[in-house]
Image: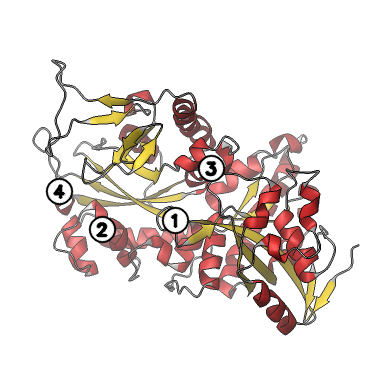
Amino acid sequence: MAEMHPYRKKDLFRRLNAYLGMTLGEADSNHVFDRTIKHPKITGIAGDVVEQSILGYPSDSDQRPDLIVDGIPTELKVTGLKRSKSNPDMFEAKEPMSITAVSPHKIVYEDFYTSHFWQKLEHMLIVYYLYDSETTVKAADYANFPIEGFDFHEFSDEDVEILRNDWTIVRDFINMLQQKYPNYEEHYPRISSELRPDLLYIDTAPKWPHAPRFRLKRSVVTTLWEECCGKQHEKLDLDVVTYGEFDRLCHRIAEYYRHMTGDKILDLVGYPSKRINKSIMEPVVVSMFGGNSRKMAEIEIFSKMGLISKTIVLNCNGARTEDTKFISVDFEEIMDESISFEDSSCYDHFYNGTFLFSIFKEPYKPAPGKSVPLSECEFLGFKRISFDDYFVEVEVRKTWDRIRHLIWYNELRDVIKRRKDGTPIINPCGTVKSAPNFPKASDGQVFLRGTSTDSTYKPVYINGINMTFQNYWVRGAYLVDLLNQTEYL
């Protein structure tokens, strides 16, 4: 077993403070980056620099914590941040934080509080650096990335209960597989896919037969960084540890508001708006949970869960009325050939996102080409969904691959929209209506659509084509079918 490395907390504070703002290259007094000359794709270089040059001990991959800080075993985690697409001055987690191996043959004999998992999480020193590049870089280029902050982190009692429950779900599922199936290892791929909708703070990746590891979700790591920077998330007294408890909470809230019109709900929650519409539904839903914030991500537990609020309106027959918008397209990722689909923000959004749908129904059939205002629609309740592996691996990937193909092979075109007689359609502002030949709703369940309040504003420039911001959309018929297979909470 490797040696544990003792430090005093006040000495670590002083030492780490001295490195804030430095790049990893400037901090590398022990020439760790020299190894990248022969090994340009070496992984973990940022952690090696912190260990060997900042803290001054050899690289350590032992399963127990790395440090002894004031007599307390403490795990060192070095993790990357990236600039937020919505606000480049804000940072978010670059990726989930790997914690420790799942180890199916050992975990079934462990208890949470003595597990390797909890030993790694109980006391952590997290060092954050900014992955300040829009494209994937070689290991040597990490030398240009600045050290942004550090935090001696201990989870709250509420968070510990959530982590304990998540870990226990994985442990008990593996134990069930081993007890039920003689060839239980053949069922290990189910660990990641089947448990994903049940885990609040963690996931497991990669999939078996590759050795899976416990990870903190990217949403959790982003929230830890925000708290490190002093951001105060709103705390709600929800007493939620499991998704089962969250679902029961949603049921109680839905029972109170069920069958009310949108405007009636708006009046009851006291949200300062004259009329309800989809653009303010997220803060309205937050108000239904008793919060005052405008976004789910501003509520601490919802932020860590990665909970995403969506609203869908059914017609009076219970069928779709429109398609639903999801995450914006990150074209830097699309154009970076070194980024795989599994490492993309698109994959993370659809694969790891938990979506809470507020479902409304139109009370009557509107005139052709019109829709019933949300203010008059009837609230039916909440449904919670996570997209399954097939949808992500087939439908989402197909669209992602098609976008890449169009851009990489210079097949992207700006297509003029025409009437049946062939004449171009003119926008109200006088410009010719056009759109890139990205996948459309007729091409599959996931497609692209531009988002803009002004058709003349086209800030995105790709392959010589100006375009509006683009979002991934999911066809309404598919979503309604998926939601019909899901019980109301």
Q: N-terminal of the two: label 4 or label 2? A: 2
Q: N-terminal of the two: label 4 or label 3? A: 3
Q: What kind of colouring is applied to the model shown?
A: secondary structure
Q: For residue 402, which numbered disc appears in the image?
A: none
Kindly identify the residue that appears in the image at 68 percent across and 61 percent down.
Answer: 24
Q: Contact (CB < 8 A) between labels 2 and 1?
A: no
Q: Mark 2 points at which residue?
A: 280
Q: Which amino acid does label 3 sit on?
A: Ser
Q: Name the residue under label 3.
A: 344
Task: Compute the Cα span from label 2 to label 3.
Answer: 28 Å
Q: Contact (CB < 8 A) between labels 4 and 2?
A: no
Give the secondary structure at mark 4.
loop
* Residue 335 visible in the picture: yes
Q: Nearer the viewer, mark 2 or mark 1?
A: 2
Q: Mark 1 points at which residue?
A: 307
Which of the two residues, 32 or 443, is positioned nearer the viewer here?
32
Q: N-terminal of the two: label 4 or label 1? A: 1
Task: Compute the Cα span from label 1 to label 3.
Answer: 19 Å
Which of the two residues, 179 or 282, is positioned nearer the viewer here?
282
Task: Compute the Cα span from label 4 to label 3.
Answer: 36 Å
> Residue 417 lies in what quarter of the image?
top left
Q: Which of marks 4 and 2 is in front?
A: 2
Label 1: few (<14), some (14–19) or many (≥20) C-alpha neighbours in 10 Å: many
Q: Where is residue 158 in the image (x, y as percent from the top left)?
A: 55, 71
